[in-house]
Image (cartoon, rainbow, N blue to C red):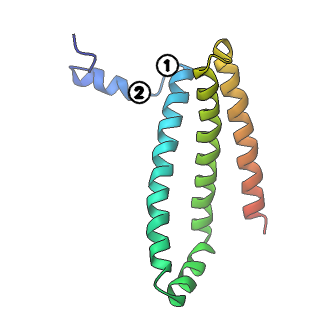
Amino acid sequence: MSEYPQQPGKLIKWFDPRHRSLGSWAFILNRVTGLGLTLYLFLHLIMLGQLAKGPDAYDGFIALVKNPVFLVGELLVIAAALIHGLNGIRVGLTSFGIGNSKQKQLFIILMSLAAVAIIYFAFRMFAH
């Protein structure tokens, strides 16, 4: 029997976020933040390529990064990096058999630490 859903109803259930375990949320969060950081890396490299075009391109870039929408994007990158990195530490520890019985508590502690750091960064970025 195939592990993939055969009926449209089962496929919709697979994407339903309700009734998921904390482990499922940790997995989904790690994948989504990893994909977001990969997208950011490509965008960052494209932007660096534009900056190599000279002083006018640099001045345009500086004007862009002062935009509040860009600051929100920067905060999202910081949030993704913190969440992905701290969740990765949890995955690494449990891969070596450290804290296997305390995965839920470890996830909650690390994500709480990420939330505090994100709030700190948001305050520092938008307080000026």
Q: Find the distance from the CA under tag 2 to the CA under tag 1.
A: 8 Å
Q: Is residue 46 above or below residue 32?
A: below
Q: Is residue 37 above or below residue 59?
A: above
Q: Which residue is mark 1?
A: 19
Amino acid on which disc 2 is placed: Asp
Q: Is residue 56 above or below residue 88?
A: below
In the image, what residue occupies the spot 56% across and 76% down?
64
Q: Residues within 10 Å of mark 2 (few under 14, many from 20)?
A: few
Q: Nearer the viewer, residue 34 or 6?
A: 34
Q: Residues within 10 Å of mark 1 (few under 14, many from 20)?
A: few
Q: Nearer the viewer, residue 100 or 17?
A: 100
Asked if the residues shown at circle 2 and circle 1 are in contact, with their CB atoms under 8 angstroms apart, the answer is yes
Picture quarter with the C terminus: bottom right
Amino acid on which disc 1 is placed: His
Q: Which residue is mark 2?
A: 16
The answer to which quarter of the image holds residue 85 is: top right
Picture quarter with the N terminus: top left
Tag count: 2
